[in-house]
Image: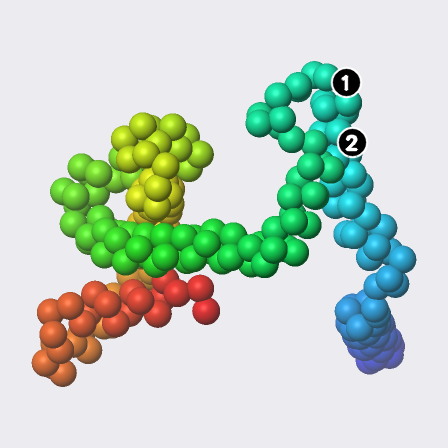
């Protein structure tokens, strides 16, 4: 009698295990099916393409309304969309549009490279030297929270309308962000990596900065 009860209990457990396994396999199959199913273009257009187009159209309507209802009458402050389109067309026909675009792109690239060259060593020093972090860490955080456009008026007053003003605005906006991002990345490096690197560098006769840069640089990289 007892053996039959034991066999019945074991059979019930086996059936329950099989049901759980079947349910788990069904769930995995459903996940694979949902992952491989392509989203219809109509859904993509409605959820991702249409909203930006509608927002752009609304901005253009408001822009044209400010001109049509004479809310803004000075074209030097706010030209109409048609005037802007005409200027784009004329610049393209005269072969000047690509030059204008390249000037902006060149300033942005060169400014970013300069900010990278300044912000990277600054971030490393702030992350490694406690006195420097206590001294300029709050300043960097405050500058990072300040919008770059806020530097345009003082930069124009101090430097004038030239390339120096452009680069100054880019540097003041990018250097604090790069330095603080590097500091945050270094702070998140697991201490185990640093201890392992220090133990590896001593018997290998590594340079003093080896235990600092070798584990930190790969650990803070985005890839």
Mark closest to the chain's N terminus, 2 or 1: 2
Which residue is farthest bottom?
A: 204
Q: How far apart in space, not on screen, are marks 2 and 1 (Cα)?
A: 12 Å
Q: Nearer the viewer, residue 215 or 143?
A: 143
Q: Which element type, helix, strand or loop, lies under badge 2? A: helix
Q: Quadrant of the N terminus?
A: bottom right
Which residue is farthest front?
A: 94
Q: Nearer the viewer, residue 206 or 26?
A: 206
Mark 1 highlights which residue? 69
Where residue 26 appears, as percent x and y from the top left, is 84, 72
Number of callouts: 2
- Residue in view at x 73 percent, y 37 percent: 82
- Specify whether 106 is left or right of 165: right
Tell me, for residue 61, which label it has, or none.
Answer: 2
The answer to whether residue 216 shows anywhere in this view is: yes
Q: Nearer the viewer, mark 2 or mark 1?
A: 1
Q: Quadrant of residue 41?
A: bottom right
Where residue 170 appears, as percent x and y from the top left, is 38, 45
| Residue 70 vertical placement versus 49 (above, below) | above
The answer to whether residue 183 shows anywhere in this view is: no
- Specify whether 154 is left or right of 22: left
- Residue in view at x 57 percent, y 27 percent: 76
| Residue 200 vertical placement versus 99 (above, below) | below
Tell me, for residue 103, which label it has, or none.
Answer: none
Tell me the crowding category of disc 1: few under 14, some 14 to 19, or many 20 or more residues within 10 angstroms, Cα based.
few
Q: Which element type, helix, strand or loop, lies under badge 1? A: loop
């Amino acid at each position: 009698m007892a053996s039959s009860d034991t066999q019945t209990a074991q059979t019930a457990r086996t059936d329950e295990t099989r049901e759980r396994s079947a349910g788990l396999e069904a769930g995995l199959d459903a996940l694979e099916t949902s992952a491989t199913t392509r989203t219809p273009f109509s859904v993509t257009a409605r959820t991702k393409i249409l909203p930006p187009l509608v927002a752009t159209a609304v901005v253009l309507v408001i822009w044209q309304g400010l001109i049509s209802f004479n809310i803004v009458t000075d074209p030097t402050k706010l030209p109409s969309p048609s005037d802007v389109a005409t200027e784009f067309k004329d610049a393209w026909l005269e072969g000047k549009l690509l030059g204008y675009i390249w000037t902006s792109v060149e300033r942005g690239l060169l400014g970013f490279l300069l900010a990278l060259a300044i912000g990277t060593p600054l971030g490393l020093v702030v992350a490694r030297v406690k006195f420097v972090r206590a001294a300029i860490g709050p300043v960097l955080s405050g500058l990072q929270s300040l919008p770059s456009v806020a530097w345009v008026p003082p930069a124009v007053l101090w430097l004038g309308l030239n390339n120096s003003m452009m680069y100054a605005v880019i540097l003041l906006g990018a250097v604090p962000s790069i330095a603080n991002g590097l500091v945050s990345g270094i702070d998140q490096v697991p201490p185990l990596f640093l201890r392992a690197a220090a133990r590896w560098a001593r018997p290998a006769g590594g340079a003093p900065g080896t235990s600092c840069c070798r584990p930190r640089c790969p650990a803070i990289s985005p890839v």
